[in-house]
Amino acid sequence: MKTEVKICGLKTAEAVERAVALGASHVGFIFFPKSPRNIEPDDAGRLAARARGRAKIVAVTVDADNDGLDEIVSALEPDVLQLHGSETPERVLSIKTLYGLPVMKALAVREASDLERIDSYMGIVDRFLLDAKPPAGSDLPGGNGISFDWRLLDALDGSVDYMLSGGLNASNIEDALALTGARAIDTSSGVESAPGIKDLTLMEAFFEAVRRAEA
């Protein structure tokens, strides 16, 4: 089965084009001022036009209010909203109702008990993004280049649709897929030469490793 691959935190036309050409199923744009991958909605909309119809467009937000979401949805016309903050199940449901878009809820994982939060979102979110819990002092909820213990996912109910994230790169993605059987994966810092700077060579190596794992 072909693995869905989301390349997140895109900021240049070159990176968007390469991600799609390599087979990305999703391209993500981050709307969070503290992130080195932050992008303005209008700029993201212009970049997304290059991928539309070839990959799903994902808007990544962190506890955004309705005004902020209005601007993002209008400019980007995303296929998916990724909520990467502390959004409650009630807030997620409100956003889904308001925009009529599929929602992917990010949950931070460090230990088994962190996965218990999934239950309260089941039936509300369309997919989970399971990311590593940020290190102490980090301002970023994701994109920190760290992984969690993938063996924790052994206990996950098979009905949970999730995208695996957190420190994935060309050197560890084969192990991650072998251990988890994840059908969808997300990388950002793992294909960067510096925070926010996508490296096309690293991107190519990542996809090559994914294809080896599939084979």
Image (cartoon, grey):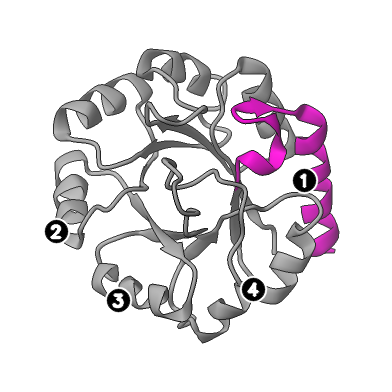
Name the dominant secondary structure of the magenta segment.
helix
Q: Of label 3 and label 4, which has the lower sequence position?
A: 3
Q: Residues within 10 Å of mark 3 (few under 14, many from 20)?
A: few
Q: Amino acid at mark 1?
A: Phe
What distance separates the C-alpha of mark 1 from that of mark 3?
32 Å
Q: Where is the C terminus found, in terms of image quarters?
A: bottom right
Q: Secondary structure at mark 4?
A: helix
Q: Residues within 10 Å of mark 2 (few under 14, many from 20)?
A: few
**On the image, numbered disc 1 is attached to which residue?**
206
Question: Image height check: is 46 above or below 138?
Answer: above
The residue depicted at 47 percent of the width and 14 percent of the height is 46
**On the image, numbered disc 3 is attached to which residue?**
119
What distance separates the C-alpha of mark 2 from that of mark 3?
13 Å
Q: Secondary structure at mark 2?
A: helix
Q: Amino acid at mark 4?
A: Thr
Rendering coords of residue 32 (x, y %): 37, 31
Q: Amino acid at mark 2?
A: Glu
- State the mark number for residue 90: 2
Q: Of label 2 and label 4, which has the lower sequence position?
A: 2
Q: Of label 1 and label 4, which has the lower sequence position?
A: 4
For residue 188, which quarter of the picture?
Answer: top right
Question: Image height check: is 24 above or below 152?
Answer: above
Q: Residues within 10 Å of mark 4 (few under 14, many from 20)?
A: some
Q: From which residue to which does the magenta span run?
A: 187-215
Q: Of label 2 and label 1, which has the lower sequence position?
A: 2
